[in-house]
Structures are given as C-alpha cells and as structure tokens.
Image (cartoon, helix red, strand yellow):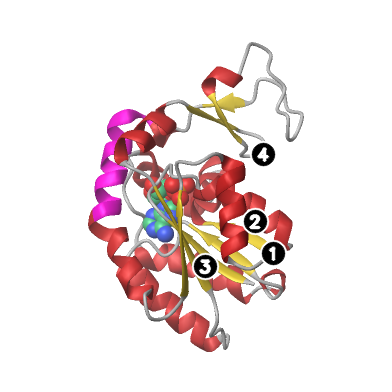
C-alpha cells in the first residue's frame, strides 16, 4: 500500500504515519525526521538545512526531492510506504509524479487530516518530542526523570526548535500558501481520504483504516 499523508504541521501526520506504517508493515518516510536527523549528526545535508528548518522555512525542492528519490528507489520501499511531509509544494508534487512514473506506481492514497489553526497552535506549543525515538507527547504527560514509554530513554523529551509559537505561525502561513494547493493537484490522481484530525489518536487511526477498507 502506498499512502501520502497530508495536512498542516501539527495536525497529527507524524503520529498517524508511525501507527499506520506499523500496522500495514510499510516504511514511514518523513522528510522532517530525515532532515532533523541530518541536522543532529551534522552531515552536509544537515548543515544546509539547519537554519531553514529551525526558522520554519521550506528546504529547497531539489534537496528534499533528492532524498525522496533515493528512499523510494530503495528496496525497503518496495512493500509500500507512507510519505509524511512530502510533497509540500506543487513543484515537489510534479517531481514525485515523475518518480512514481519511473517506478510504475499508479495506485496510491492521499490521506488528508484537517484541523483549525487555533487547535494546531495549541497542540504544537504543548508538545514535546523524544530526542531518542521521535515519540510525541503532550508536555503535561512528561514529568521529572520521565522515561519514554516507547524507547525507554530517560529525560529525553525536548521541545523542537521549530515548535516555537512565532515559527509555527510561519509554518502555517507557508502551508496555506504553498502546500494546501498540492491537494487540488491530487484530486484526480489519488484515491482521497479526508479525516477530521481533531478526534483522538485512536479515532483518527480507525477512521483512516475504515476508509482504506482495512
Ligand atoms: P515536519 O516534521 O514535516 O513538520 O518538517 C519539519 C521541517 O522540515 C519543515 O518545517 C521544513 O523546514 C522541513 N521540511 C520537511 N519536509 C519538507 C519538504 N517536503 N519541503 C521543504 N521543507 C521540508
């Protein structure tokens, strides 16, 4: 199964993508995670992306498209994948169309999660991320000497640099201007599933799986 998970930053794409990848035994490809990992390890890609990611901007199309081309051509994507955070511009969608064409990929789903900006801002400003495994929790759940329920790391929950309120507002603005139009691009190309992202994590997962007939 091939899925593009789509929606504003903070709407729950990463959380749902991880759950779905696990359940469906497909690979989760998050350009945001790949970029953050590169920044952490100080690779050439990380050095190029650092200031852009931390200020809430968009990394140039050719760079992210190159990452996606490599991963989709890899053996581990053959069983299916869930793309999270890509494509984010019409140009990226066009490049992805070429990659799908090269790989003979015709059938895929676009799962769109929706939520109002106020809910997203509230969610993002209150979320912490495990620096070890990427798990996301509300800051109220994270106490002193907290042990990550997913990977067991201790005191590993941090605020992402791009989760600052001003940065979030910029990311949402870029989403409305550059990413939201990508949805129309896919209207006649993908099987579309639209889900209310303000429901609980479990409800959102269930609605997606039901819509995918799984
Ligand atoms: P995310 O975790 O998907 O919210 O991504 C975090 C940040 O990584 C974004 O705010 C961008 O700076 C960068 N990024 C991730 N995916 C892309 C993409 N497809 N195009 C451009 N920049 C991206």
Dot 1 falls on a residue whose secondary structure is: loop
**Mark 3 closeness class: few <14, some 14–19, many ≥20 residues within 10 Å:** many
Given contact means CB atoms under 8 Å apart, are the residues at marks 2 and 1 in contact? yes
Q: Quadrant of residue 161?
A: top left
Q: CA distance from mark 3 to mark 2?
A: 19 Å
Task: Name the residue: 72% across, 55% down.
Answer: 22
Task: Name the residue: 39% across, 68% down.
Answer: 62
Residue underneath mark 1:
26
Q: Which residues are magenta?
A: 164-176
Residue underneath mark 2:
20
Name of the residue lying farthest toward the top: 144
Relative to 206, residue 169 above or below: above
Q: Which quadrant is home to the C terminus?
A: bottom right
Given contact means CB atoms under 8 Å apart, are the residues at marks 1 and 4 in contact? no
- Mark 3 Cβ and ligand 1 under 8 Å apart: yes
Task: Name the residue: 31% across, 71% down.
Answer: 184
Residue underneath mark 3:
68
Dot 4 falls on a residue whose secondary structure is: loop
Between residues 15 and 55, which one lies in front from this camera angle? 15
Q: Which mark is residue 117?
A: none
**In magenta stretch: residue 168:** yes
Given contact means CB atoms under 8 Å apart, are the residues at marks 1 and 3 in contact? no
Q: Where does the image place residue 130, in percent across and percent down from the top left?
A: 61, 32
Q: CA distance from mark 2 to mark 1?
A: 8 Å
Main SS, magenta region, reads helix
Residue underneath mark 4:
133
Dot 3 falls on a residue whose secondary structure is: helix
């Amino acid at each position: 199964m091939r899925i593009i998970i789509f929606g504003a930053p903070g709407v729950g794409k990463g959380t749902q993508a991880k759950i779905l990848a696990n359940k469906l035994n497909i690979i989760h490809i998050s350009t945001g995670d790949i970029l953050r990992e590169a920044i952490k390890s100080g690779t050439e890609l990380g050095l190029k992306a650092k200031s852009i990611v931390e200020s809430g901007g968009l990394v140039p199309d050719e760079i992210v498209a190159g990452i996606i081309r490599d991963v989709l051509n890899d053996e581990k994507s053959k069983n299916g994948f869930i793309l999270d955070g890509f494509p984010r511009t019409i140009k990226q969608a066009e490049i992805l169309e070429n990659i799908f064409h090269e790989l003979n990929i015709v059938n895929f789903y676009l799962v769109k999660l929706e939520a109002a900006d106020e809910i997203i801002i509230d969610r993002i400003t209150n979320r912490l991320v495990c620096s070890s495994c990427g798990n996301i929790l509300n800051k109220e759940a994270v106490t002193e000497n907290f042990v990550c329920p997913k990977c067991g790391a201790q005191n590993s929950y941090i605020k992402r640099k791009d989760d600052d309120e001003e940065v979030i507002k910029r990311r949402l603005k870029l989403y409305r201007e550059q990413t939201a139009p990508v949805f129309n691009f896919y209207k006649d190309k993908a099987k579309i599933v639209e889900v209310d992202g303000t429901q609980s994590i479990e409800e959102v997962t269930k609605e997606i799986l039901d819509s995918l007939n799984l």
